Amino acid sequence: MFSQFALHERLLKAVAELKFVEPTPVQVAAIPPALEGRDLRVTAQTGSGKTAAFVLPMLNRLIGDAQPRVRIRALILLPTRELAQQTLKEVERFSQFTFIKSGLVTGGEDFKYQAAMLRKVPDVLIGTPGRLIEQLNAGNLDLKEVELLVLDEADRMLDMGFSDDVQRLANECANRAQTLLFSATSGGNGLREMVAAVLRDPQHLRLNSISELNEGTRQQIITADDPAHKERLVHWLLANETYQKAIIFTNTRAQADRLYGRLVASDHKVFVLHGEKDQKDRKLAIDRLKQGGVKILVATDVAARGLDVEGLDLVINFDMPRSGDEYVHRIGRTGRAGNDGLAISLICHNDWNLMSSVERYLKQRFERRVIKELKGVYQGPKKVKASGKAVGAKKKKTDDKKGAAKAPAKRKPVAKRPAASTLVSQDGLAPLKKRKPAEE
């Protein structure tokens, strides 16, 4: 029960109103030390309830009587505008019985409108690094009195090239009392450097190892001959799988648009989401998917983070993601909050090595699946090792060929020579000198 936490009664009232009953493992682990004011570095899978794990302690710190707003007291940084919008809604839901006000600053929205909002000084500011830096450079943003800094999906912000922006914004919050950093993966050296730079004596909470992520999601691969074959497989899966909602991921905008066109031509209700879509179209696509107006979304990795859609139970990787972390975030769209999901990756010959590297990263082996009606020629790389005998025979044959290529012209056979001490010429008339051994 949430009553186990030392939360303000107004927050517990909001939790009850929202019908939150049992806290998730990440909430149980993170909320108490966060309430104590500790810096935290938390690794937990997507869909595990991370947002509430930092929003509730943050609001508990800020809660109080109504006062004139003269400073931004908390800053939440996120990688994408979709995740920022979703987080704003969560903050507003949990703070509904308080006097705390929130504001949003992301790309794709009117710059002057955001500047006017900043002049009203919200208690909590939620935003993406790029647009926040623009407002900072324009003199519209003052973060010097921020008490609490939250970095959510920190690994993704690094992947997107926001490292310098995040570091600068953290430096602007120089007087903060607490920093909370959340990510779905452990990241690499870049994330470790960020942790060392922005956190002070942090408590590390690792709720899931990579191999334990998305245990409720079946992970399959289907081999394909080419992109056209992949398109036929997508049509078959959408027609034959049982699902409420589905996302199909591509690596490029051009492929997303092409696949979207093919699906629309086949009378599927579908939206497409990628970086070239303006904010209005992106919001419409996500809202229609959440409301059930469409069942299918074709997207690039812009939607791989922060997209929380109830009933999303099928993910298809039309293109294999370029890293293990991206794979984790893609399939994290399904199998959320303890529900079951299905993730299917379509694998051509140029996808196989990527797929194998993801298997090694996750320390898992994906289920191999064949659709009989659409079975292709390509079934994965040919096995190099058959039996030891076959391999040896093949090697000997190869060596023989190499030897034949390098051997000198065939000589006539000669009689076996006597010992070196008694060597004589072939005509038997004179003894031969002892030969030096040939150089190897």
Image (tube, helix red, strand yellow):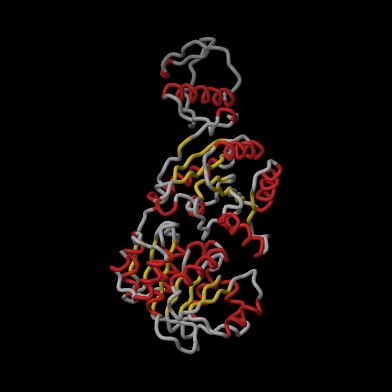
Q: Is residue 206 visible?
A: no
Q: Is residue 64 visible?
A: yes
* Quarter of the rendering containing residue 63: bottom left
Q: Residue furthest left?
A: 4
- Total labels: the figure holds 0
Pinpoint residue 102: horizontal percent, then vertical percent.
Answer: 51, 77
Pinpoint residue 181: horizontal percent, then vertical percent.
Answer: 42, 68
Image point (41%, 25%), residue name? 388
Depth order, front residue of 194/265: 265
Name above or below for residue 25 compared with residue 196: above
Pinpoint residue 254: horizontal percent, then vertical percent.
Answer: 69, 51
Pinpoint residue 160: horizontal percent, then vertical percent.
Answer: 56, 63
Depth order, front residue of 125/240: 240
Image point (42%, 21%), residue name? 389
Q: Classify residue 100 as left or right of residue 225.
A: left
Name above or below for residue 300 compared with residue 389: below
Q: The N terminus lies in which quarter of the figure?
A: bottom left
